[in-house]
Amino acid sequence: EMRLTMNNLRLTDAGIAALSGGLPGSLRRLTLNFTGTEVTDAGMDSLASGLPRSLEYLYFDFELCDKFSDNGVRALAAALPAGLRSLTLYFISNPAVTDDAIFALAAKVPQCLSSMDICFSSCPRITDSGLVRLGEKVPENVEELTLDFSRTQIGDAGLR
């Protein structure tokens, strides 16, 4: 198990690449908090490429990280290990993230998840179609589900 909090550090893509390159291949639980860092799409790509395939529990917090776009989320989604049981992703207050990020995540959600906590709060370009797509792709065996889309463009149509 590895837990690392790096809130408001001057952490750049180079630091993230070094971190992800050093993750043990046998790691089963990973908790990383990047709140307020300068991670970009390149950093997200490095992080994604370093994810151990053995992960069963993954928690990433990107609150107040506004330097990456849909491409960064897409890279991370594509690298989610198939055997993941618990997934927590917080993308809070990123004006560059759109429904395309949710579409990419929805397409790659591991089907054996039992716990899923996804937050796109305060991402103003998230709309009904993003929530609907994610809702359609929630695995059947999920026992715990938390979705936070506060302060987005979601209305009644997103809840169908």
Image: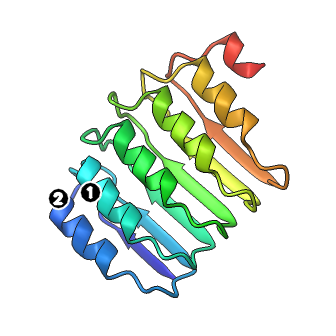
Q: Which mark is residue 12?
A: 2
Name above or below for residue 136 compared with residue 7: above
- Tag 1 near tag 2, CB within 8 Å: yes
Residue 7 in view here: no
Name above or below for residue 69 compared with residue 128: below
Residue 59 in view here: yes
Q: Position of residue 31 (x, y in %)?
A: 48, 68
From the viewer's side, name the closer residue of 18 and 143: 18
Q: Residue at x 33, y 52 (%)?
A: 35
| Numbered disc 1: secondary structure | helix
- The mark closer to the camera, 1 or 2, is 1
Q: Is residue 150 left or right of residue 133?
A: left
Q: Residue at x 80, y 53 (%)?
A: 142
Q: Which mark is residue 43?
A: 1
Q: How is the image coloured?
A: rainbow
Q: Position of residue 10 (x, y in %)?
A: 15, 58
Type of amino acid at the residue the image marks with label 1: Gly
Q: Position of residue 58 (x, y in %)?
A: 55, 65
Q: Residues within 10 Å of mark 2 (few under 14, many from 20)?
A: some
Q: Which mark is residue 82?
A: none
